Amino acid sequence: MYDIIIVGGGSAGSVMAHRLSAGSANKVLLCEAGQDTPPGNEPPEIRDSYSGLAYFDPRFHWTELKVTTQIVSHNNPDESRPPLRKYEQARVLGGGSSINGQMANRGAPTDYEEWEARGAVGWNWKDVLPYFKKVERDLDFDGPFHGKDGRIPVRRIPHQHWTGHSQAVGEACKLAGFAFLPDQNGEFTDGYFPVTHSNQDEQRVSAAMGYLDRETRKRANLTISTNTQVKELLFEGTQCVGVKALVDGREQEFRGREIILSCGAIHSPAHLLRAGIGPVGHLKEMGIPVLTGLAGVGQGLMDHPSIALSSYVRRGARMNEHTRRHIQMGLRYSSGLPGVPAGDMFVAVLSKSAWHSVGEQIASLLTFVNKTYSETGQVKLASRDPLIEPIVEFNLLSDRRDLDRLMSGFRKMAALQMSAPLKAVTDKPFPASYSDRVRKIGVVNTKNKVLTAIAATLMDGPAALRHYMIDNFIVEGFTFEQVMSDDEVLEAFVRKAAIGVWHASCSCRMGRADDPMAVVDTQGRVKGVQGLRVVDASIFPVVPCANTNFPVLMAAEKIADAMQ
């Protein structure tokens, strides 16, 4: 018997376990389906400042999870749907923070004003900033925007340590009229900057490392149970009283006064649906007795749609001895689309595209719509069996404004790519696609290491051979010249290649009691039942203009504070 059971040991779960077991009589159980990351003995792939090794390592994934990203045919949505794609959702203590790109940004102040306008009262910028500051220990900056005492250190790669490629992108941005911002998390304005990341001494600091450290683990009232997959929420009437879980493959029940779902925007709504909490029609379709009808469960799933322009990087401009961080700088700009707030677009500059030898030769300008309007994604059950992954449909680009801004963003990046600074250090730009072929070669194994080493040797050879290899083995269906000379071809490329950036959110939204699509209140409590909360990215009213890890940490800090 526990006071609090937390289902999911990712970013939110790590914060909740730390805060709710501190200085109190609460007996807390944290259940995580994946493996532990013991303090001082974390897997080296997770510790690595370069995130590509952990991200593509199936040991840390829900390996059967597949999603559809968007409807291919905009004229006839029923005509053709995109194929299912593997989705790298973390299954390890620390969750996404153990495998992600370590990006530590917050979003625009206007995001949180919109949260409040959508019914999340008490979640405006003034209300959330103290909790962002509470999360972090900024190693570079002080002042009103920064925390100095938090459990997650953040820092930036200084300009003089950037790769030649990143420095060339910075020079191209300067020539294009963009301002240099020394602090991405200071005043929210347009410009290029060294990206802020959750990292210290060239090593990742995940939520598990920061919040579930040795001292926290010594608490007698905190139990961390890894390799523990929760199968079912247990109810007595409308009171949630516990969970049924597989612990190292053996079924066990745990009882608790309060249960907190922190499983992310895909698995948290799936848990609710299997418990009979969700849209009545879907529950009846699945043969699940309705515990409480909540139309918003699994609806409104969001992510940031993105597109990439890649190029071959010449030898002297590749990764250097200063850092293993491959994302050293970024660009925030305003599309100028009518009615859209400033700073709605983001470009992550990748000086390396994968862990292997060819990846070290390919750089990318990854452009994504930071302020997206596509809100028609959904999570539904494929089966009542908790071991069967749900149906996940992101429906990216369902709002024309997102498509238009990706197209204009690609053109903007092409202009940077063709500027003198970048032409000097790169060759053969091409529209890139995160296809199944790219995914397969990205899996960390000996075969891929050998194959890419051979290919990389050829790529560094004569330009004619390099161009042939890029055209025939890397480019998939669209050349740079084609998409730049024909808007219809550019649109076709964007529709085919646009993917999310692993910022799944908004599928169990916070809102007012009278909002039929709201799933939880402003403290994460699920409507219509007792003893059950959701605390993760699924409760966001709308996805902020940010990588989602720090907004999740902030939300967990804020709700934990309200619970104490």
Image (spheres, rainbow, N blue to C red):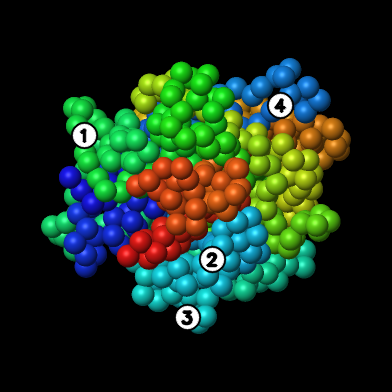
Q: Amino acid at mark 1?
A: Glu
Say above or below: 1 vs 346.
above
Q: Pointer 4: residues within 10 angstroms few (<14), some, or many (20+)? A: many
Per the image, label 1 sits on a secondary structure element best described as strand
Residue at (72% x, 36% y) in the render:
398
Q: Is residue 539 visible?
A: no
The residue to which callout 1 is attached is: 253
- Label disc, if present, on residue 142 of the rendered structure: 3
Say above or below: 168 vs 302.
below
Give the mark nearer the N terminus: 1 vs 4.
4
Using residue 481 as the reference point, say whether residue 226 is left or right of it: left
Q: Position of residue 278 (x, y in %)?
A: 50, 34
Q: Position of residue 31 (x, y in %)?
A: 27, 43
Residue at (18% x, 27% y) in the render:
250
Residue at (83% x, 56% y) in the render:
338
Per the image, label 3 sits on a secondary structure element best described as loop
Q: Is residue 269 visible?
A: yes
The residue to which callout 2 is attached is: 122
Classify residue 280 by image quadrant. top right
- Viewer-proximal residue among 430 and 498: 498
Say above or below: 390 vs 36.
above
Q: Amino acid at mark 4?
A: Val
The residue to which callout 4 is attached is: 72
- Label disc, if present, on residue 200 of the rendered structure: none
